[in-house]
Image (spheres, rainbow, N blue to C red):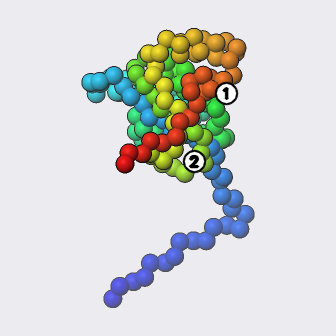
Amino acid sequence: MKQRKSPPPALPQDFEAAESGLGFTVWVHLARPASAAEVRLYRQGLDRYLDENGLSRSMNPLHMLVWATERSLTLVDQIDLLVWMVHDGRAVAVEIGPLQTHMGLPAGRDRVPTLPVRLADNSLLSMVWLYRVGHLPAEQCVEMLGGFQGPVTLH
């Protein structure tokens, strides 16, 4: 005779569910062919950067959801990560998704608009320098990069 499993215990009455904050999806393109050692070095540097800034990411460092447990992320967090990637030098292109409610999984590229950035673009270096010294706000960086572009669907 099969025994029924007892139901899970009820949550305490004073339990407050944590609100989902804003996070964003990032697609990273490393130079091809990237060796396993190069991917590992990129991942280690990325994890150090995220940890130093109180951020977390999903499992895959090439298609990841970025969020913080203590706060919602902002456009500044997105541009700061982009600036780190420029200085790290391992990625050749990055696509950043818009801020969205953190649901635990990265967005699909065909589902959200993205901010595509080629890291070898010479004008990007000037923008990064101006941003880092405080002469260019994150909103203007996004505008200079062409803004978030809608997902592309092929028919």
Classify residue 72 as left or right of residue 44: right
Image quarter for residue 110? top left
Q: Can you tell which mark lies on residue 17?
A: none
Q: Can residue 67 be seen in this view?
A: no
Marker count (numbered): 2
Q: Earlier in the sequence, mark 2 or mark 1?
A: 2
Mark 2 lies on residue: 102
- Locate the N terminus and report the quarter of the image it occupies: bottom left
Q: Could you tell me how far apart the alpha carbons at marks 2 and 1 are, in whole angstroms?
A: 21 Å
Residue at the image point whose x is 48% and y is 47% from the top: 111
Amino acid on which the number 1 mark rests in the picture: Glu
Classify residue 102 as left or right of residue 108: right
User: Which of 128 and 1 lies nearest the eye of the viewer?
Assistant: 128
Q: In this view, does 16 lie above or below 91?
A: below
Q: Is residue 92 visible?
A: yes
Mark 1 lies on residue: 139
Q: Where is residue 51 in the image (x, y as percent from the top left)?
A: 54, 30
Q: In this view, does 113 lie above or below 35?
A: below
Looking at this view, name the residue that lies furthest to the bottom: 1
Q: Is residue 117 above or below residue 62?
A: above
Q: How crowded is mark 1: few (under 14 residues within 10 Å), some or many (20 or more)?
A: few
Q: Residues within 10 Å of mark 2 (few under 14, many from 20)?
A: many
User: Which of 86 and 121 lies nearest the eye of the viewer?
Assistant: 121
Label 2 close to label 1 by CB (< 8 Å): no
Residue at the image point whose x is 56% and y is 35% from the top: 148
Amino acid on which the number 2 mark rests in the picture: His
Image quarter for residue 153? top left
Between marks 2 and 1 in the image, the one whose residue lies nearer the viewer = 1
Q: Where is residue 10 in the image (x, y as percent from the top left)?
A: 61, 71
Image quarter for residue 62? top left
Looking at this view, name the residue that lies furthest to the right: 14
Residue at the image point whose x is 53% and y is 32% from the top: 115
